[in-house]
């Protein structure tokens, strides 16, 4: 039904003529048309207005040529729906005026009705699906419970999320209550996204790598596994954990259809640690898109040779940076489309 089904084939582990390609944060600030809309509408207005979210979501499909679309939204709309105030401050990023740092604050966090609080996301999905006209699949996403907790407790972005970790290690009971509430909300949210029409979902554990392997199991993976268990019979799930290479073996046995990896692991080690059978996604260093297009193309070809063309989805190892020239993003995508198994 979907004309370009390379991405869905790779998720199933089927043989493809070339691997599919998309970029994390592909609907973003490196696109001049995105910047025009950003001048007119603030961040959460763009998220909450289905026409705008649709327009932004399809931009990289037409302008860069990726093989999948990812809905323009943010992982932080989930804590917003749970009664946690979240602002997007220009120049600062996510800003939460009332961080969750006590048992009482956790008790006040709600598991919301999804249709009432996040219905606008489902409207954006339906509108985007129509606009895409079955050209490429649409990816829905959510943050991992741990990554959402990081923002909810820290109150803003951080290099080490020290306040989030302090909360977990000094008040583990409240931390687990919060993680479970986020998990329950996320499961209902992703199920609603599936109903609305997304073709795959990705869980972003952007800050899982802040934890030791043991703490990762307790505070992050346990909850991601609950989400995968609840979704995997309905839709392919991609689990992306930045800096989480130490958990690849566990992740490979989770029922996820694919695992996202960052650039700090070689293709060979990622294949080895994940058991060699599961589809992998990644892992170009986003800063490498500053290299000249010819060099980008060479490196992408080498990356595909290392991962192998099958059971592989070409992507960056984290989100595209805002000041990457569009030409360089295009070179990244073109290199994949020109790939010939050698
Ligand atoms: O193209 C896509 O990937 C879809 C849209 C998307 C956004 N955020 C749009 C966005 C996705 C998938 C996200 C996920 C997200 N949001 C994550 C996980 C992925 C990752 O990068 O680790 C995280 C941690 C967030 C939280 C968040 N939202 C941050 C850290 C920021 C950046 C703040 C800044 O100014 O640098 C945002 C804002 C945000 N989300 C922007 C975009 C395009 C930029 C701000 C803007 O457009 O005004």
Image: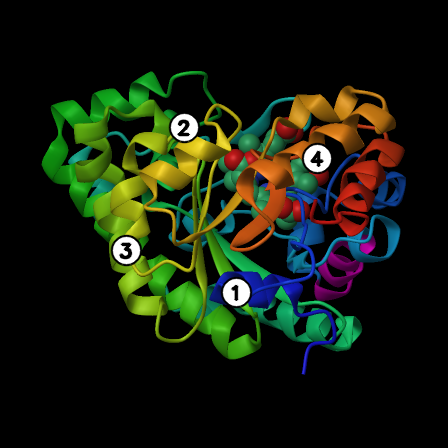
Q: Residue at x 27, y 42 (%)?
A: 249
- Numbered disc 4: secondary structure: helix
Residues at marks 2 and 3 touching, judged by CB atoms closer than 8 Å = no
- The answer for how far apart the CA atoms under marks 2 and 3 are is 18 Å
Q: Does residue 100 lie above or below 134 as drawn? A: above
Quadrant containing the N terminus is: bottom right
Residue for badge 1 = 200
Would you call the spot at circle 4 few (<14 residues within 10 Å), some (14-19), or many (20 or more)? Answer: many
Q: Does residue 300 lie above or below 177 as drawn? A: above
2 vs 4, front mark: 4
- The answer for how far apart the CA atoms under marks 4 and 1 are is 24 Å
State which region is magenta.
50-59
In the image, is residue 302 part of the stretch drawn in magenta? no
Query: Residue 273 placed where, x, y %?
Result: 32, 37
Residue for badge 4 = 300
Q: Quadrant of residue 51?
A: bottom right
One can see residue 111 in this view: no
Query: Residue 296 placed where, x, y %?
Result: 77, 28
- Numbered disc 2: secondary structure: loop
Task: Give me the disc on residue 254.
Answer: 3
Q: Quadrant of residue 161?
A: top left
Between 7 and 241, the one lying in front of the other is 7
Q: Is residue 19 left or right of residue 289?
A: left
- Numbered disc 1: secondary structure: strand
* Upstream in sequence: badge 2 or badge 3: 2
One can see residue 164 in this view: yes
Q: Is residue 81 left or right of residue 297?
A: left
3 vs 1, front mark: 3
* Upstream in sequence: badge 4 or badge 1: 1
Identity of the residue furthest to the left in this view = 173
């Amino acid at each position: 039904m979907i004309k370009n089904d390379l991405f869905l084939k790779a998720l199933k582990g089927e043989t493809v003529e070339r691997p599919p390609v998309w970029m994390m944060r592909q609907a973003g600030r490196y696109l001049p048309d995105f910047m025009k809309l950003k001048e007119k509408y603030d961040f959460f207005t763009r998220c909450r207005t289905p026409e705008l979210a649709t327009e932004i979501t399809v931009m990289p499909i037409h302008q860069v040529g990726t093989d999948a679309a990812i809905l323009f939204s943010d992982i932080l709309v989930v804590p917003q729906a749970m009664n946690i105030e979240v602002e997007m401050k220009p120049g600062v990023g996510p800003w939460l005026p009332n961080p969750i740092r006590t048992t009482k604050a956790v008790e006040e966090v709600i598991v919301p009705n999804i249709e009432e609080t996040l219905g606008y996301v489902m409207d954006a999905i339906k509108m985007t699906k129509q606009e895409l006209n079955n050209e490429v699949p649409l990816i829905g996403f959510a943050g991992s419970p741990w990554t959402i907790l990081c923002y909810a407790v820290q109150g803003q972005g951080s290099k080490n999320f020290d306040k989030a970790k302090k909360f977990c290690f000094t008040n583990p009971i409240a931390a687990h209550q919060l993680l479970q509430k986020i998990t329950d909300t996320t499961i209902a949210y992703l199920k609603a996204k599936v109903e609305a029409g997304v073709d795959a979902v990705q869980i972003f554990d952007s800050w899982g790598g802040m934890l030791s392997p043991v703490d990762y199991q307790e505070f992050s993976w346990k909850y991601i596994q609950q989400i995968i268990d609840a979704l995997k019979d309905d839709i392919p799930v991609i689990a992306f954990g930045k800096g989480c290479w130490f958990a690849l073996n566990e992740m490979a046995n989770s029922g996820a259809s694919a695992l996202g990896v960052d650039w700090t692991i070689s293709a060979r080690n990622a294949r080895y640690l994940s058991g060699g059978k599961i589809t992998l996604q990644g892992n170009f260093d986003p800063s490498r898109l500053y290299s000249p297009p010819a060099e980008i193309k060479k490196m992408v070809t080498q990356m595909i040779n290392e991962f192998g063309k099958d059971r592989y989805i070409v992507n960056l190892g984290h989100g595209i940076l805002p000041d990457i020239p569009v030409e360089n993003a295009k070179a990244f995508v073109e290199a994949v489309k020109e790939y010939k198994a050698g």
